[in-house]
Amino acid sequence: MKTKSFLTGMLIVLLSAIVARADAQNAKFTPQAFYSYDASGKITGYNLPALPYAYNALQPSIDSLTVSIHYDKHHRGYFTKFTGLVKDNNLEGKTLDEIFKNMSKYPDALRNNAGGLYNHTLYWENMGPAIGARPTGALAEAINKQFGSFDKFKEQFSNAAKNKFGSGWAWLILSADNTLKVTSTSNQDNPLMDVVDQKGAPLLALDVWEHAYYLKYQNKRGDYVDAFWNIVNWDEVARRYANAMKH
Ligand code: MN
C-alpha cells in the first residue's frame, strides 16, 4: 500500500512537471510577466505587466496624460475584465497563446478583453524614449528583403495605420512561411487569433483607437502615426523577431 501511494505520488509529481513544461511552451508569444507560476512552473494567475517607463517618457510624440489614461484606465480595464472572463469560461491556467488559437470558440467579450490586455502590453513594450532609432542586424536585413527598404516598410505600415477605418491596430508580423507582412486588425483583434485573416507572430503593434492619440492630436491620426516612428523600441522588435524565427 505504502509503495503504491508512493508511486502514485511520484506519478503526480512527474505529470505536474510535464503539464508545467507545457504551460511554458504554450506561451511562445506572450511576455512571461503576464503569468504567475507555482513552484513547479504551473500557471496560477495573470498579471498586468507594469508600464516599462514613466508616463512622460514618450513625450513629445505621446503626451503624459494620454499614456497615463491609456495605461491606468483602458489597459487596466481590459486586464480586470479578462481575469473575470477567464474564471467565467473555466480557462484558468491557459496561456493567452492558447486562448487566441481557439478564439472563435469563446464569447466576444473574451476576444475583446484578452486582445486588449495582450495588444497593449506589446504596444507599450515596442515603444520607448528612442528618438529616431532604426532596426539593425537580421531584422533590418529581413525588412529590406521583404519591402525593398526601411522607408518603403515605414510607408506601408503607416498607410495601414492611417487607413484603418474605425478602431483597430496596425501590425508587422512574421507569417508561418517566415516572411514579414504588414497587416491591420479591427477592435482588439490580433494576428494570433484564429478569427483573423492574416495570422502570424506579432513583431510591432500600433494602436490606432482614438483614445491612443485624441487628447494631443484630435482628428489628426496621421500626425500620431508619423510621430510613432520617433519612439519605436527596435531592440524589442528584434527580440520578438528572433523569438518568432525559433518557433
Ligand atoms: Mn488602446
Image (cartoon, rainbow, N blue to C red):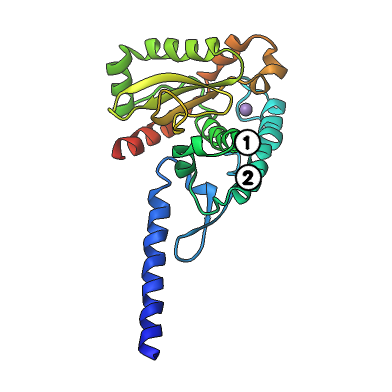
State the residue in front, 227 or 39. 39
**Which quarter holds ligand 1?**
top right
Q: Quadrant of residue 225?
A: top right
Identify the residue at horizontal 43%, vertical 46% (top origin). Answer: 27
| Residue 30 seen in render | no
State the residue in front, 215 or 211. 211
| Alpha carbon distance from label 2 to label 1 | 8 Å
In the rendered image, residue 153, in percent from the top left (x then y), is placed at 39, 14
Q: Give the residue at the far bottom of this rendering.
A: 1
State the residue in front, 163 or 152. 163
Q: Earlier in the sequence, mark 2 or mark 1?
A: 2
Q: Are marks 2 and 1 in contact (CB under 8 Å)?
A: yes
Q: For the C terminus, which image quadrant?
A: top left
Q: Is label 1 in a helix, a strand or a loop?
A: helix
Residue 209 disc label: none
Dot 2, crowdedness within 10 Å: few (<14), some or many (≥20)? many
Q: Is residue 214 left or right of residue 135?
A: right
- In the image, residue 74 sits, relative to residue 35, either above or below, namely above
Q: Amino acid at mark 2?
A: Leu
Number of numbered tags placed on the structure image:
2
- In the image, residue 160 sits, relative to residue 25, either above or below, namely above
Identify the residue at horizontal 71%, vertical 35% (top origin). Answer: 73
Identify the residue at horizontal 68%, vertical 9% (top origin). Answer: 219
Q: For the N terminus, which image quadrant?
A: bottom left
Would you name the residue on which mark 1 appears? 109
Would you name the residue on which mark 2 appears? 85
In the rendered image, residue 162, in percent from the top left (x then y), is placed at 54, 11
Q: Amino acid at mark 1?
A: Ala
Q: Is mark 1 within 8 Å of ligand 1?
A: no
Q: Is residue 123 left or right of residue 63?
A: left
Q: Is residue 28 left or right of residue 232?
A: left
| Residue 159 seen in render | yes
